[in-house]
Image: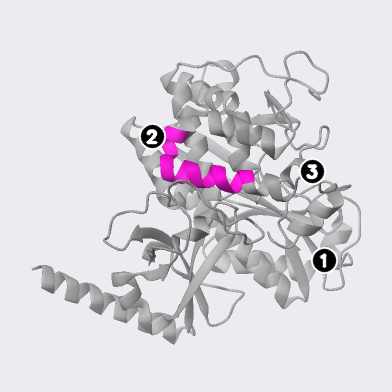
Amino acid sequence: MEAGSAAATRSRLRARAADLAAGGVEVIALTFVDNAGLTRAKTFPVDRLPEVAAHGVGMSPSFDVYTSADRMVASPHVGGPDGDLRLFPDLDRLVPLAAQPGWAWTPADRFEQDGRPWAACQRRFARRMADRAAALGLTLRMGYETEWTVVREDGTDPGPGPAYGMARIVALSDYARDVTRALREEGLSVLQLHPEYAPGQFEVSTAPADGPVAAADDVVLVRETVRAVSARHGLRASFAPSFTPDRVGNGCHLHLSLHRGDTDLHRAPDTAYGLAPEADAFLAGVLDRLPALLAVGAPSPASYLRLVPSRWAGVHQCWGVENREAAVRLVPGDGHAEVKCFDAAANPYLLAGAVVAAGLAGIADRAELPEPVTGDPVGLPGARRLPRTLDEATGHFEASALLREAMGEALHGAVLAVRRAEAEDFAGSSPGDIAAATRWRY
């Protein structure tokens, strides 16, 4: 029976590879995101899909302790030249890339050579946290919004105009249309695309996904699609937190809602702000642990150039109803919450999983949200600043027993090593040097 099942699986995969080839696909990119937030890839010809699905593709575990500058460091469980992992494609997410003719993409889960799950796999961590929620009868809808800055190859702004201005859309109408078209062709539901505040800056929002893994998969696909469309238009796209220090930076806000069955717990009738007790406790858990979560969701020294008060970056540890200055913004009309202090230097799998872990801890603790903040929190009593440096955030992360337990020693230790190395590498650097060094890494 097992031999027959394996033969049937190989036959299906050969047929799928043939279908992809008939549609013009020649090469498949297999990706994972490291702890510095960089998407790493291996590629293989489409006709090798059955073999790769069965045996994976090799890649060193050392990439879990690479910094954004490709410096390899070490942690107690990860590091050094020894060992190898197998990257296995998630065939449910395999999709032709609309802006890269001849290519398809799939995210990878990582395993050890003997078939055991790799303890430091960030995608599997996000899945474990989703499973923890499911064991309580809870599911999450999650999604990231993506901000980026686009420039011509010579560094000039290709679409001058005011913040959120139609002038920028007119100047780059073909580009904005092609980004929208490519994402839709890849099966993503585009909610909106618009010019953002800074010169050359845009934002795209896609529909929320069922769970943290799907949400992270979506945002990886969004970024690489935007990057590819930009290149085809002779442009460069940067998702770095700080393109230049004197401008509003690029965020990557996380939107989420908690559900029990078909019930959206952010739309509870006859409760304050529409939050059912479990949703209130979940958000309270996230809010309480934001100083440690910042080392996950704002993991670069450049992140702290973006986290400036009165720029809608969410730098205060508070929440508010439709308050874009609060770190946690409740959006009652859409039945969800937004965490605003994160950016695209974050590994989206690691971040989504960590937020779920924090929220579930809030439910276990029967935590309650404090009173919401109205207006700009600057100077308000009780509106504490979140960490101002990566060093400070890393200290909170290191001390978090919750995140250490949720991630496990191997993953937690690797993240900690990378954060310490990033802080060390940029110690004493000017804001301009930090922005310049990270501008094209993301």
Q: Which mark is residue 305?
A: 3
Dot 1 corresponds to which residue? 151
Tag 2, which secondary structure? Answer: helix
Residue at the spot 35% in from the left edge and 74% down from the top edge: 52
In the rendered image, residue 96, in percent from the top left (x then y), is placed at 50, 73
Q: Earlier in the sequence, mark 1 or mark 2?
A: 2
**In this view, 31 is above or below 427:** below
Tag 1, which secondary structure? Answer: strand
Q: Magenta-highlighted stretch: main secondary structure?
A: helix
Tell me where residue 61 sits by quadrant. bottom left
Q: Quadrant of the N terminus?
A: bottom left
- How busy is the neighbourhood of tag 1: few (under 14 within 10 Å), some, or many (20 plus)? some
In the rendered image, residue 154, in percent from the top left (x then y), is placed at 87, 73
The verdict on residue 417 being magenta is yes
Question: Could you tell me the amino acid type at mark 1?
Answer: Val
Q: Is residue 9 left or right of residue 245?
A: left
Tag 3, which secondary structure? Answer: helix
Q: Which mark is residue 133?
A: 2
Question: Could you tell me the amino acid type at mark 2?
Answer: Ala
